[in-house]
Amino acid sequence: MDNIDRKIIALLAEDARQPLAALGAAVGLSASAVNERLRRLTEAGALRAIRADADPAALDLPVRAFVWLALAATADEAAFRAAIAARREVTACHHVTGPWSYLLQIQVADLAEVESFLALLKAEGWLARSETQLALSEVVAPPFRYPGRA
């Protein structure tokens, strides 16, 4: 990856809807050369996806919660990771250091859905203990990944 690749990625992070010609003009390449670089960056795994930045409130998902989770001693960690990756309300999952195993970010419609999510973690046997914090407002946030998958 060179500086042109990094600049293309930065430009896409600002606005993923930019035409290839606009990206090319910004970095001094043709649209086809930019397209080829995007293909190579995707194949190499440097560019994982180009996503829309959706407004959670407009999607009726105004509640963001952070769940600190310690896995149960009997939990199968690989199965937990697969199950969490499939949950539509989970917008981020981080394996962390310290007293917790994972930090989950969820985006839901209301507090009842937060409660339902926690109940699911307990029912599935993943949870040794947890602590949940609610976001009151955003100061700086990454683009919102719409959790609309089935």
Image (cartoon, rainbow, N blue to C red):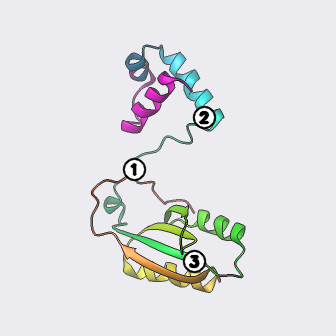
In the rendered image, the vertical position of residue 129 relative to residue 55, given as above or below: below
Please provide percent x and percent y for residue 15.
Answer: 37, 36
Q: Dot 3: within a 10 Å radius of its alpha carbon, few (fewer than 14), some, or many (20 or more) residues?
A: some
| Image point (41%, 26%), residue name | 19
Quadrant of the rendered structure where residue 22 is?
A: top left
Q: Amino acid at mark 3?
A: Ala
Q: Earlier in the sequence, mark 3 or mark 2?
A: 2
Quadrant (top left/top right/bottom left/bottom right) for the C terminus: bottom right
Please provide percent x and percent y for residue 51.
Answer: 46, 44
- Start and end of the magenta stretch? 1-22
SS type, badge 3: strand
The residue wearing badge 2 is 42
In the rendered image, the vertical position of residue 86 relative to residue 53, given as above or below: below
* Residue 89 in sight from this viewpoint: no
Q: Earlier in the sequence, mark 2 or mark 1?
A: 2
Quick check: marks 2 and 1 in contact, CB under 8 Å?
no
The residue wearing badge 3 is 70
SS type, badge 1: loop
Q: Amino acid at mark 1?
A: Pro
Prevalent SS, magenta region: helix
The residue wearing badge 1 is 143
Q: Earlier in the sequence, mark 3 or mark 1?
A: 3
Q: Dot 2: within a 10 Å radius of its alpha carbon, few (fewer than 14), some, or many (20 or more) residues?
A: some
Q: CA distance from mark 3 to mark 1?
A: 27 Å
